[in-house]
Image: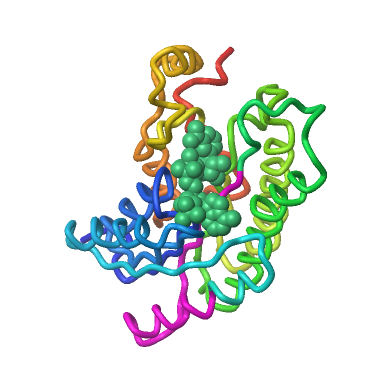
């Protein structure tokens, strides 16, 4: 039997990239996947279609994180979808994957206060509020998985604000791991390295070549290689891991 059959999962930002691969991976293990998107409803529907084609179950929920009322909006749709598919509103797994990034090429000297607010709102505040809200739906033994970044462990000045927000997300992991341990709920971070999410920057020959050198394996990561780590954390086999940061960088931090 599949390792996650009978479970339900919400993956934020699963309209594409690592989030999509994660929703697919969780669904392949039998979980009902709530595929969340910010703006691209069509792409989210494509994720749902891919899951269904694969024999899995999924539904889409939309909410632009960082805007007022987004968390309420998301949970309203989530609870309706869960009720429709399962007859109840239990959420076993929450993957905080959606994130805003510092626009490429912005030097630390040029980052605006508004950009800082936006990045923190999406990458740190929203995950906190989502975890807080999910506590009402998550059973004992549930899973919170936060997608952080290797840039929390490696200096990259052009990404300072983004890295600060991921550092804040890692603190969410640490403190909630302690808080929720009495309920056997685990809380972990996964740190991807450079992962080909299909966006233009990863397709530019020169840049791709250069970015590939960061990994010990001299290539970019694939979304499903990160998703595999997330799926493992979601299973019962990972029950002894909490408050951890799992490296999913292909050895990019080996030095
Ligand atoms: P993508 O840029 O491919 O996708 C981002 C996803 O997040 C989309 O589904 C997007 O939805 C959603 N999203 C973004 N902003 C918002 C918002 N304000 N509200 C709701 N949804 C939003 O991301 P990746 O797959 O590259 O990254 C996934 C995670 O991995 C992120 O947390 C990222 O920081 C992390 N990571 C990625 C690395 C990489 O090299 N790719 C490296 C290290 C970490 P929509 O388009 O519908 O708005």
* Colour style of the rendered protein structure: rainbow
Residue 68, image x and y in percent? Answer: 69, 70
Along the line of sight, which residue is nearer the eye, 126 or 7?
A: 126
Q: Which residues are magenta?
A: 75-100
Q: Is residue 35 left or right of residue 175?
A: left
Magenta stretch: includes residue 92: yes
What residue do we see at 41% from left, 85% from top?
88
What residue do we see at 37% from left, 42% from top?
228
Magenta stretch: includes residue 90: yes
What residue do we see at 60% from left, 61% from top?
65
The answer to whether residue 158 is above or below residue 96 is above
Q: Is residue 228 left or right of residue 77?
A: left
Q: Is residue 54 left or right of residue 204?
A: left
The answer to whether residue 254 is above or below residue 48 is above
The answer to whether residue 40 is above or below residue 101 is below
Residue 145 visible in the shown view: no
Residue 147, image x and y in percent? Answer: 55, 45
Residue 2, image x and y in percent? Answer: 24, 59
State the image quarter where residue 32 is shown. bottom left
| Screen quadrant of the N terminus | bottom left
User: Furthest-bottom residue in view?
Assistant: 87
| Screen quadrant of the C terminus | top right
The answer to whether residue 158 is above or below residue 118 is above
Along the line of sight, which residue is nearer the eye, 247 or 238?
A: 247
Residue 192, image x and y in percent? Answer: 51, 34
Residue 37 visible in the shown view: yes
């Amino acid at each position: 039997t599949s390792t996650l059959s009978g479970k339900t999962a919400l993956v934020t930002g699963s309209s594409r990239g690592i989030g999509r691969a994660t929703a697919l991976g969780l669904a392949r293990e039998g979980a009902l996947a709530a595929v969340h998107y910010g703006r691209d409803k069509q792409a989210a529907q494509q994720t749902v279609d891919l899951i269904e084609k694969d024999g899995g179950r999924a539904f889409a929920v939309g909410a632009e994180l960082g805007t007022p009322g987004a968390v309420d909006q998301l949970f309203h749709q989530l609870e309706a979808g869960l009720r429709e598919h399962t007859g109840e509103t239990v959420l076993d797994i929450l993957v905080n994957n959606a994130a805003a990034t510092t626009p490429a090429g912005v030097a630390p000297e040029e980052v605006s206060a508004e950009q800082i607010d936006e990045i923190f709102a999406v990458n740190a505040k929203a995950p906190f509020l989502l975890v807080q809200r999910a506590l009402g739906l998550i059973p004992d033994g549930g899973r919170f998985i936060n997608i952080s970044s290797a840039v929390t462990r490696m200096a990259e000045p052009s990404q300072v604000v983004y890295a600060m927000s991921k550092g804040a997300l890692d603190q969410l992991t640490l403190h909630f791991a302690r808080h929720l341990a009495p309920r056997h709920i685990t809380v972990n971070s996964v740190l991807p390295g450079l992962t080909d999410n299909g966006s233009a920057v990863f397709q530019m020959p020169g840049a791709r070549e250069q970015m590939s050198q960061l990994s010990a394996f001299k290539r970019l990561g694939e979304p499903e290689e990160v998703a595999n780590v997330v799926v493992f954390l979601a299973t019962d086999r990972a029950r002894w891991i909490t408050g951890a940061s799992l490296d999913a960088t292909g050895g990019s931090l080996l030095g």
